Amino acid sequence: MAVPPIQRSLRSVAPGNSWLLDTLLGLLVVCALPLAITTIPNTLSVVARLLPADIDQVGLMRTHGLALPVLMLAVPLAAVALRRVPAAHLMLAGLALVALSDAAGGYAVSELLVGVVRVLRGVGCGLLVPATLVAVWTRTPVLRGLWAGTFSLSLLTAQALALWPLDAVSSWKVTLQPYPLVTGVALGLAAAYLLAWMLLGRPEAPVFAVGERGRLLLCVVLALGIAVVAISTASAGWRAPPVVLLAATAVFGLLALASIGPVESRRAAYVLVAVGVVLLPSAAQVTLVEMGGLGGPGLRGLWIPYVVAGVLAIGAAVAVRLFAVGAGRWLAPLGLLSMVVGLCSVRLVVPSADGMVLAVPFTLLAVGAAVALTATLQEVGIGAAAFGLSLCVAGVLAGFLLGTGVQMALLDGVRSAQELVDKFVGALHWWALIGGFLLVAIIVLAAVLARRSEGDEGGKQAFEDVLLVTAPQGDPGAGSEAVDCAGEPRKWGDAFAAADDSGRGGERGPGATEGGRSVPNGPAFAEAEEGQVPAVPPQAKSPEDDRAP
């Protein structure tokens, strides 16, 4: 029987060279993963005042948003390709496409060219995300923890990182090439890693289980449906109720698809769907509310909370990977509960003119996501992990759709700048409430389905053990029949001995057994000047409070 290419024996890495490969791979993960996730936010509305008058601004903003739908389609397709293509090759190809989009971004002068640039960037980043996961899968536990912590931090800071290069810019094209220097560094690291991978010894590649390809292709179909819905709602001027309904349907579809597979795969898929739907959409709204143009501290006042949350998230992920192996059954829901507490703190402390207080919700969200991801991914194979990652990136778009629907419902009929700020904060508080309930529902769903599946499998196994261990009693002269767990006979009667003598080399006994809405334009970093910007509103009332504000 032919051996699949992913299972071919590879030259093992010499112990003295392993540290070099691990170092290069760790630097590549820290550099490339945030670069890939930063592609997701659509920040063109922030520099809308710089757009040429002869360009359709609304159409350009919609075209700019193509990167996320393309990325979430590329992730499961790249995971399928990784069954045969080495991760080192795919990482280099992905970064080459990102570099090409950076170079082409300076020449984009029309809606069509902007769309081409964003599609190229979405494909490149869609290759990067699963390729980095596969690359670290068989390496040291520290690298796998680093990947989970960096991925969680990237989701938390994606909106802020996308806004950072736009301070005091003179050209809107910066949104198409936000970090060309970082792209160049990552591309150099990918080339160095590929060279070291080829010369020093090729690490053993993880093996995808049979049937994982079909589940990944189902992710492509579902992601395509969500992408069509998102593009339609952005192009047809839909009202809030149908947008919310379609977004909720998309989340339900993700959870239904996550229910395919064994118990461990279901738990991982549920956790990744929850992180994708909640983390980036929540952090993006908090970041926008805290901008200087809306009375917050601006990004300069948010970087310390981001750094604190990032260090703790990566440290927690590495610690779980090193010291809590096999504890995913209780650590994963505990991480999601930390995210629930983080959303509750968002309702309590946001908006705030003091950025330091935001270290609390940021840390709870990032650490909770990192712990949940690390704990649940260490219990599954690479195929189930890639399947869950594909659902996660699709969940990001579903979460943005749901958050946009909530904003549309609350911002309808706004008449003044201060009312806009109040309603925008109210939409954030509503979203935090919805996200918290969604996380709790997923925790309960995972616990109930996992327990039921384990009970069914336990009953089935017990029944099979009874059939295997206790055989019907025959003629006393022939002796009793008993079969061990591997299907081999423990004691044979005369009839079985005679059959064995006459048919050696035959088959074994029967017991044998053989993976929205755009925000107001304004500087993202400026301090709020009294009398020139809307004041930060007082703490918004709870959405479930019917009293007048």
Image (cartoon, helix red, strand yellow):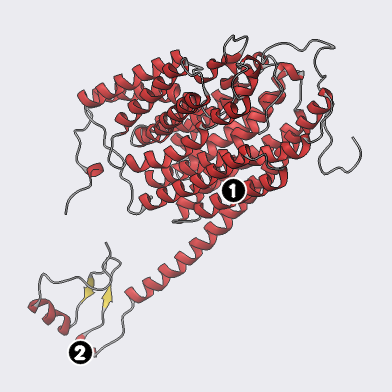
Question: SS for tag 2?
Answer: helix
Taking 5 as reference, is 284 above or below it?
above
Does residue 168 appear anywhere in the picture?
A: yes
> In terms of sequence position, does the residue under pointer 1 or pointer 2 come before the other?
1
Residue in the picture at 67% in, 13% down: 525
> Looking at the image, which residue is at 34% across and 22% down?
190
Q: How far is the residue under mark 1 from the one under mark 2?
A: 65 Å
Residue position marked by numbered label 2 in the rendering:
477
Q: Nearer the viewer, residue 265 or 416?
A: 416
Q: Quadrant of residue 103?
A: top left
Read off the residue under disc 1: 251
**Circle 1: is it few (<14), some (14-19), or many (20+) Cα within 10 Å?**
many
Total marks shown come to 2
Residue 47 placement (x, y as % from top left): 63, 17
> To which quarter of the image does residue 537 belong?
top right
Residue at image x 53%, y 16%?
173
Q: Nearer the viewer, residue 499 or 373?
A: 373
